[in-house]
Image (cartoon, helix red, strand yellow):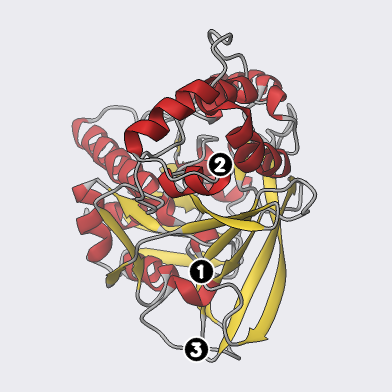
Amino acid sequence: MQIGIAGAGFSGAVIARRFAEEGHRVVVFEQRDHVAGNCHTERDPDTGIMIHRYGPHIFHTGDERVWNYINGFGEMVPFNHRVRTTVGGRVYLLPVNLLTINQLFETAMGPDEAREFIEMQSDPTIGEPANFEEQALKFVGRRIYEAFFYGYTRKQWGLDPTELPASILKRLPVRFSYEDSYFNHPHQAMPRHGYTTIVEAILDHPGIEVRLSTPLTDDDRVDFDHVVWTGPLDAWFGYDQGRLGYRTLDFEEIRADGDLQGCSVMNYGDFETPFTRIAEHKHFAPWEEHDKTVAFREFSRLCGPDDTPYYPIRLANDKGLLRDYVARAEAASGVTFVGRLGTYRYLDMDVTIGEALAASDQMLESLSSGRTLRPFYARVL
């Protein structure tokens, strides 16, 4: 069977490998000049620092199948991601924890005392939160909300928090301990030689042909028995009903001698600061030593037709348009939509790999039993 795959990120690479291992012929089309999608990494020629070209990516998971899978294609080095934020000229820990609370309120509370204190700060008049701001005020109160969530959220999404759904802030964003690890997953790591070498290893199979700088076109589709589409869902239809909304990022490079900020990521919560954060990339590989440094300021804005999409907006108008595209996609034949862009969802790397493995299981089982391949692996709406 001939399989055409659009996109050489993790979704496309994992599915390509699975099909090739089962004896199918696979051609992967990638419109960029490199594999690994937004996870692409490369050595900076001047400093030797491993650069995350499209912003930092930290691998973390509790999925043992995914953890074992990625370790089969490259060495993963333990890495505990920690984030700081600058607000009002002071540096605090994120996520908000016991030290953050004591710093902000100039107190020395213990866990139980701090929990009661935060409950007193919360707004008891809010029943079911109608938006992001109400969600934050209901759980942490105005002082913490305005310090750590209001400005950053406005910059990240380009909207007032009252215009964003409460679901973005899904749970109480406070830890009543001094634990400052950004993630809670049991496996947290960075690839010693970058993500691109891992994706290259996944695609290194005699049954896989990779065509870089080559998008999969309408004319190409007829050459394959089935197509796996990891590109934007609306792009499959030529954006003929309009474009789904995304936020994109602009990066402003900083080069210096020594160490710029002493940590991998420093957020900037004040709305008056135009960028959302600075990522200093040598700190993503603490086992390496570099005399110089490379960092990037990140600026968030609305994604245009020629920009790299990062975060699906999924507001009311986007969900209506999404329903229209999904209805058409579900009626399509010969194509399966997977991945972050193909299903218009923000997915962490481990979820992307896990869904690609599960989608491969389902697709290969369907083929063996003679059933039609379904258009979507994951729930889109």
Is residue 174 visible from the viewing direction of this image? yes
Q: Secondary structure at mark 1?
A: loop
Q: Please, is residue 343 above or below residue 315 in the view? A: below
Which comes before the other along the chain, label 3 or label 1? Answer: 1
* Label 3: element kind: loop
Query: What's the residue type where badge 2 is placed?
Result: Phe
- Determine whether 229 is above or below 197 in the image: above
| Residue drawn at point x = 64 percent, y = 41 percent | 147
Q: Position of residue 207 (x, y in %)?
A: 31, 64
Identify which residue, 332 or 320, lies in the foreground.
320
| Residue that label 3 marks | 290
Q: Write down the residue under mark 2.
A: 105
Circle count: 3
Q: Is residue 16 above or below residue 96?
A: below
* Front label number (1 vs 2): 2
In front: label 3 or label 1: 1
Can residue 8 be seen from the camera position used here? Answer: no
Type of amino acid under label 3: His
Rounded to the nearest angstrom, the CA distance separating label 1 from label 2 is 24 Å
- What residue is disc 1 on? 263
Local secondary structure at mark 2? helix
In the picture, measured across the screen, residue 157 lies left or right of residue 81, that is right
Where does residue 223 sit, x and y in percent of width and height? 49, 49
